[in-house]
Amino acid sequence: MVGSLLALGVPARLRGFHPDAQAARTPAPVTRGRRFLAMLCDLLWSVVTRVVVAIAVQLLQLERRDLLTSGLANDVAWWVVLGTWLVLVLATGRTVGDVAVELRFVREPDGAAAPRALRRPLRFVAGIGGFMLLDLAPPGWQWAAWLFAAVSLVAMLLTVNGRGLPGLVTGMRVADARER
């Protein structure tokens, strides 16, 4: 992140990269590598956001001189992040990783898909939301979240275009977000 911020100060002519506006709008093939990068972005965004929220909650506790445990800060952070993800996926049908790598789930023109009202909730539960919900399990049961992550990774590797669990559960396919 620091390197990216420092790179902003380098003049464009010295960066060696000259984006072509037309090429930036042209859809690219959906690869498993691209899907994996989206999944990794989701995981990293969840972890980083959770840490930031937990630190903010702990700072508020110090400010108020509360004698609350760090467990509360972690619980609050987890619920805030889970709620944020839920709102994002229900509102857009996409995760942070999907947006970062320009992906979206679309219905096949003649394919059988989950009913429209269920697609986004199912997308949430079969993706990062399912992992996060399982990670909230009582101590000793967090292995279920990591089993879910492993199954998600295998499903992404074995399904067409890496549609993974969200695609299997919703009956949707992964497409470039710039695709019409």
Image: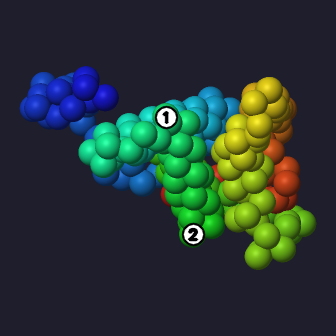
Residue picked out by circle 2: 91
Q: Given the image, on which type of amino acid does mark 1 rest?
A: Ser
Residue picked out by circle 1: 70
Residue 28 lies in what quarter of the image?
Answer: top right
Where in the figure is residue 83, as x and y percent of width and height?
57, 58
Where in the figure is residue 5, as x and y percent of width and height?
21, 32
Q: Mark 1–mark 2 contact, CB under 8 Å?
A: no
Give the CA separation, mark 1 to mark 2: 31 Å
Q: Quadrant of the C terminus?
A: bottom right
- Residue 170 appears in the rendering: yes
Identify the image's colour scheme: rainbow, by chain, secondary structure or one colour: rainbow
Name the residue at 85% across, 50% down.
168
Name the residue at 76% across, 76% down.
117
> In terms of sequence position, does the residue under pointer 1 or pointer 2 come before the other?
1
Q: Secondary structure at mark 1?
A: helix
18 displayed left or right of 43: left
Where in the figure is residue 129, as x and y percent of width and height?
68, 49
Q: Nearer the viewer, residue 158 or 139?
A: 139
